Amino acid sequence: MIRHDFAAGLLDIRRSVKASSPLIHCITNPISINDCANMVLAAGSRPIMAEHPDEVGEITAMANALCLNLGSITRDRLEAMGISAAIARENNIPMVIDLVGAACSSMRKRYLEDFIPKFKPTVIKGNITEILSTCGIECKSSGVEANRGQLVTGDNAREYGDILGKWATEHNVVLLVSGPKDLITDGRDTYLLSNGVSMMGNITGTGCMLNSLVAAYLPAGNPLGAALLATATFGIAGEMAAKKSDGPGSFHIKLFDEVYNMGEADIITKTKITKL
């Protein structure tokens, strides 16, 4: 169970989104695009999935948050992301970017070296290997999966929090490190979350779905809270879905149901969080 005052802040974000149904512009990959749209809907926001470079600027300008994803990237999508990010930056529209494959692709790494200082995303999300690579810290890549030897654990979380918190402060960003244990920091406050189940690794696109869930909560105006609420909600939904499913197929379906049906009491009583 989390503290009452802390829970109240997260629940305020949730209520704000459900009451206002903000528009979330998602430029994501074709592997997970449908799941990302449905996850945004399950949270109470509204998705729009435009990605043509000739229209994305107009779409982003009318949105309340921008969700970007480097997975299965194409030249057109890279161009579209830059156009949308520029509009978001100009209009103070919060954005989150998922660093899919940043540690295993020199092209994606170069893109981010230009993108992050130019457009200043609100939240940067990735697995530990992708985050370390983007922060210029030595890491070992294994495709788009995190290197298991570098995962965040209870033993190394404070060390990671110190290192990544410094980078987050320098770049004025919230970092969300996803994994079996999730680390979230804005440089001032750092949290370790332990919700979730191993079954989440048996379906494609869970990281992308989490990224879209962060975007769904960003319009409430509390980036750190949005990252914390999204991560807790997604992990709890995974735990609840696993109890009602027989395998990855039924788990996949139940995951959306649990996010949609989650009550405030679930957030309060089931969130496993430690402030470091």
Image (cartoon, grey):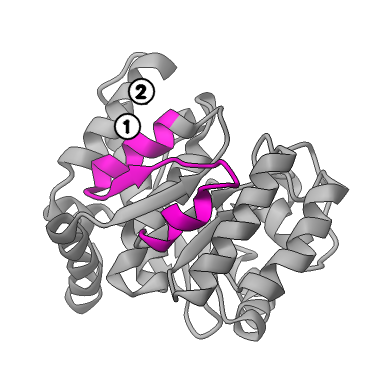
| Residue 122 in sight in this render | no
Left or right placement of residue 229 versus residue 180 in this view: left
| Residue 74 in sight in this render | yes
Circle 2 SS class: helix
Residue 76, above or below 120? above
Disc 2 to disc 1: CB gap under 8 Å: yes
The alpha-carbon separation of the residues under discs 2 and 1 comes to 6 Å
Pointer 1 local density, CA inside 10 Å: few below 14, some 14–19, many at least 20: many
The picture places residue 98, in percent across and down from the top left corner, at 58, 52
Circle 1 SS class: helix
The picture places residue 17, in percent across and down from the top left corner, at 21, 59
Judge whether residue 70 is colored magenta: no
Pointer 2 local density, CA inside 10 Å: few below 14, some 14–19, many at least 20: many
Q: Amino acid at mark 2?
A: Phe
Residue 181, above or below 122? above
Q: The N terminus lies in which quarter of the figure? A: bottom left
Q: Which numbered tag is attached to residue 264?
A: none
Q: Amino acid at mark 1?
A: Leu
Q: Which span of residues is magenta-colored?
A: 34-62
The picture places residue 174, in percent across and down from the top left corner, at 52, 71
Relative depth, front residue between 143 and 75: 75
Q: Which residue is mark 2?
A: 251
Residue at horizontal 26%, vertical 57%? 22
Q: Which numbered tag is attached to residue 255?
A: 1
Left or right placement of residue 190 versus residue 75 in this view: left
Residue at horizontal 51%, vertical 60%? 96
Residue 91: name its quadrant: bottom left
Judge whether residue 49 is colored magenta: yes
